[in-house]
Amino acid sequence: MGKREIEKYILKNKENMYRIRKELFENPEIGLKENMASELLAAMFREEGFSVIKGIYGLETGFRAEYASGSPGPSIAFICEYDALPEIGHACGHNIIAAMSYGAACGLKSVLDDIGGRVVVFGTPDEERTSGKVNFVEAHAFDNIDAVIMCHPCTESEESGTTLGLGALQFEFRGISAHAALPKEDCRNALDALVMSYLNINNLKQYIPGANIYGIIDNGGSRPNIIPDYASMKYYIRAASKKKLQEYMDRVAGCVRHTARASGVSVDVTEFENRVEGLVTNHTLSDVFKENYEKLTTLRLKKPETYAATSDIGNVSNVVPTIHSWIGITSAGGPALHNPEFTDATMTDFAAGEMLSAAVAMAQTGYQVITEPELLQKIRLEFEK
C-alpha cells in the first residue's frame, strides 16, 4: 500500500517538480554560482517540512535537507545537482536531476511517519567542474546513510553501471627569461620544457592504452620577444580503477619531471581539481530500482556499458551503497548530453513523463530498503565485498 501512496503523492504534487525543472532551465547558473537554484530548492524543501542547512562543507551553494520520522530505521539519501554548463545551459539535464530528487524525497517522506527512518537530500554544487560531492565525502556527510539513489537524464534508459576515475594535474615550469634576440647562456626556456613534456606524454600514451590522457597549454608566455620563464599546462587523466588512475598519474608526472630536469628548469606538479573516483554500482539496489521503474513506463533499462566520462557520484559510491541510473528523455538517436538540443529536450512533455516515473521509482526503491530488512542486508553485504 505504501508504494501506491508514494505514487499518488508525487503525481498529485507534480507541479512542484515542473516548477523546479522550468525555473532552472530559464535561469541556468554555472558551478559554485547556483544561488537561485539552491535558494529555490532549500525553500521548497522547507515548505515540505524538511529541516535545511545551507552553505555546508565549504560550498556556499550546497545544502542538506532532512526529514526524520522520529522512529528508528534506515536513512535514504537523494542527490540534487543544479549547476549548468556555460553558454548552453542545462545540456546535462541537471534541472531534471534536481526535480527528480525533490519529487522522490517528498514522495518517500509522505509515508515515512508510518515506516520509520530518515530521508536526506544533499544539494551538491558544481558537478561539472570542481566535483562538489568530493567535499561532502571528505566531510563524512554520508557516514550514516544506508543507500544513495540518483538518476540522470540521457538519450536512452540504462541501468546504473560504471564510470572512469579522473585525476587533474597541472604542471608549472619555471626557468630564466631573456630577450629572445639576445639569449644569455644561463637562459632557461620554460616553454621549451613544456613543449617537450607535452610531446613525451604523447609518446607515453602508446604504452598505457587503458588510460585516457589529454591536456591543454594554459600559459605559454606573454610576448614572442621574451623567452618565457614560466609556462603551464593542465591534464585530465582517466582510468577504470583507483589503482590504475594513481599508476597513470605517477607515470605522467614522472615523465614531465624527467623532461624538465633535462631542460634545466624546475616544475611544480599539483592537482588543480578534486580527484574523482569511478562509480561502483550496488547491483542489488539497482535491480530493485529497475523493477520499480519498468512497472511505471514503457521504457526499459538496458544493460550498462562502461561510461567513458566521469562524475563525482563515483566518490559517493565508494563510501555508501549507491546507484546512478540513466533515464531516457529523448527518442532513440536524439541529441546527446552537452549538446544545446539536449537542453531543449529537458522541457518536452516526454521528458516530464519520464521524470515523474523515475521520481516515483526512486522513492519506491527507498521505501523497500526501509521496509525490507533482508534487502538492506543484501545491499550491505554486496557493498562490503
Image: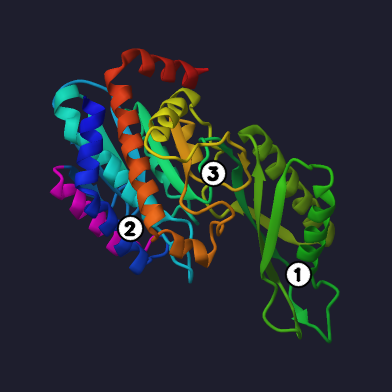
Neighbour tally class for label 1: few under 14, some 14-19, many 20 plus, Cα within 10 Å:
many
Query: Does the magenta run of residues contain 34?
Result: yes
Q: Are marks 2 and 3 in contact (CB under 8 Å)?
A: no
Q: Amino acid at mark 2?
A: Arg
Which residue appears at 28% of the width and 27% of the height?
367
Query: Does the magenta run of residues contain 273?
Result: no
Q: Nearer the viewer, mark 2 or mark 3?
A: 2
Residue range in magenta is 32-49
Question: Against 169, is 115 above or below?
Answer: above
Majority secondary structure of magenta residues: helix
Mark with earlier residue (2, 1): 2
Distance, label 3 to label 1, CA atoms, is: 29 Å
Q: Is residue 383 left or right of residue 143?
A: right
Question: Against 102, is 7 above or below?
Answer: above
Location of mark 3 (residue): 276
Quarter holding residue 248? top right
Q: Are marks 2 and 1 in contact (CB under 8 Å)?
A: no
Which residue appears at 22% of the width and 47% of the height?
53
**Picture disc at residue 191:** 1
> SS class of the residue under badge 1?
helix
